[in-house]
Amino acid sequence: MTEPEVDALGVIERQWRRERPDLDLAAMVVFGRLGRLALVAERRIDAVFREHGLRHGEFDVLAALRRAGAPFELNPSALADTLMLSRAGMTGRLDRLEGAGLVRRIADPADRRAVRVALTGAGRALIDVVVTEHTENETRLLASLSAPERDELDRIARKLLGALESG
């Protein structure tokens, strides 16, 4: 039987086991690997967005509008809630996207005092290209796992996230 490959977290774990054998390090190592995984994946994911002149948060806005379905518009509050973002943070993103011609603010026909955010034709065309490349990229990032392993990882991540978000 071969010994598992030692990564940077494995080295840290060995150091702590040597110095503090009384500690239960299992959770620290798991969260350390999850954090490292998030950083490494985020860099590779963000690279796709940068190729199209977008930041990750701007992609999120365009994607939320596209997922909303025709006519591809939402009010800014609903958009902020969907993205778990402050209203101020949303305003900055919308300003940048509007300046780039990817979204436009339009009067809400149901309430003349309110506005809605709509994808422009250019915004829809861009998000359709980017989301295709994004999903292909994320599929590549998980290529070292078999389909059952991906399913198991998803099941475990969903379970842990549910427990942490509810508690």
Image (tube, rainbow, N blue to C red):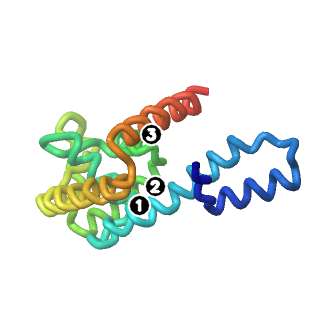
Where in the figure is residue 100, as x and y percent of width and height?
25, 69
Which secondary structure, mark 3? helix
Between 61 and 131, the residue placed more toward the observer is 131
Which residue is pictured at 49% across the width and 62% down the height?
40
How packed is label 3: few (under 14 Cα within 10 Å), some, or many (20 or more)?
few
Rendered position, 85 above or below 166: below
| Corner quadrant of residue 77 | top left
Where in the figure is residue 25, as x and y percent of width and height?
75, 44
Q: CA distance from mark 2 to mark 1?
A: 5 Å
Circle 3 residue: 153
Q: Are marks 2 and 3 in contact (CB under 8 Å)?
A: no
Where in the figure is residue 131, as x and y percent of width and height?
24, 55
Lower position in the chain sequence, tag 1 or tag 3: 1
Q: Are marks 2 and 1 in contact (CB under 8 Å)?
A: yes
Q: Which mark is residue 123?
A: none
90 horizontally vs 64: left or right: right
Which secondary structure, mark 1? helix
How packed is label 1: few (under 14 Cα within 10 Å), some, or many (20 or more)?
few
Q: Label 1 is placed on what type of residue?
A: Gly
Q: CA distance from mark 1 to mark 3?
A: 35 Å
Circle 2 residue: 89
Which secondary structure, mark 2? helix
Lower position in the chain sequence, tag 2 or tag 3: 2
Circle 1 residue: 92
